[in-house]
Amino acid sequence: MTDTTSDTLDARRRRLIYRSWYCGIKEMDLLLGRFAKTHMASLTEEEVDAYEQLLADNNDPRLYRWITAQEDVPAELDTALLRKIRDYATSPAFTKSPFTEAPQ
């Protein structure tokens, strides 16, 4: 017998990885796609919820400016997850290779 909660969480993670590669603007596709590919499997269920909400509630240009520190993040949205994404965006893991293809 399989764990339905685990199956559902795995399915959500797969959907979020796909959605991260196809956000809208190419810069966000690369940034969030690579973040999701690297970190999604290790996110807790609460972090997956927060990531899903972050993508649903914020438009790409504003989110991009927050992640790249071009604009201050509103205090109510400055979460541990958003800081994790910002840290990733400035890390050598992200910055060493500017071009990554989306999954086929």
Image (tube, rainbow, N blue to C red):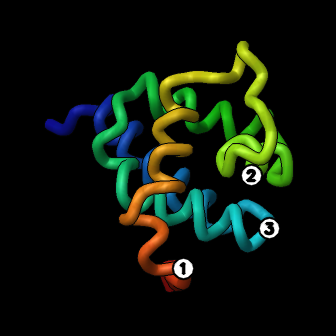
Q: Which residue is mark 2?
A: 64
Query: Is 90 left, or right, of 59 in this rendering?
Result: left
Q: Which residue is mark 1?
A: 98
Distance, label 1 to label 3, CA atoms, is 15 Å
* Contact flag, marks 2 and 3 (Cβ < 8 Å): yes
Which residue type does callout 3 highlight? Ile
* Local secondary structure at mark 1: loop
- Give whichever of discs 2 and 3 has the lower sequence position: 3
- Give whichever of discs 1 and 2 has the lower sequence position: 2
Which residue type does callout 1 highlight? Pro
Which residue shows up at 31% across the image and 48% down it? 41
Which residue type does callout 2 highlight? Tyr
Q: Nearer the viewer, residue 101 or 27?
A: 27
* Local secondary structure at mark 2: helix
* Contact flag, marks 1 and 3 (Cβ < 8 Å): no
Q: Nearer the viewer, residue 100 or 43?
A: 100
Q: Is residue 18 above or below residue 69?
A: below
Which residue shows up at 55% across the image and 44% down it? 86
Q: Is residue 87 above or below residue 95?
A: above
In the image, which disc is placed on residue 25?
Answer: 3
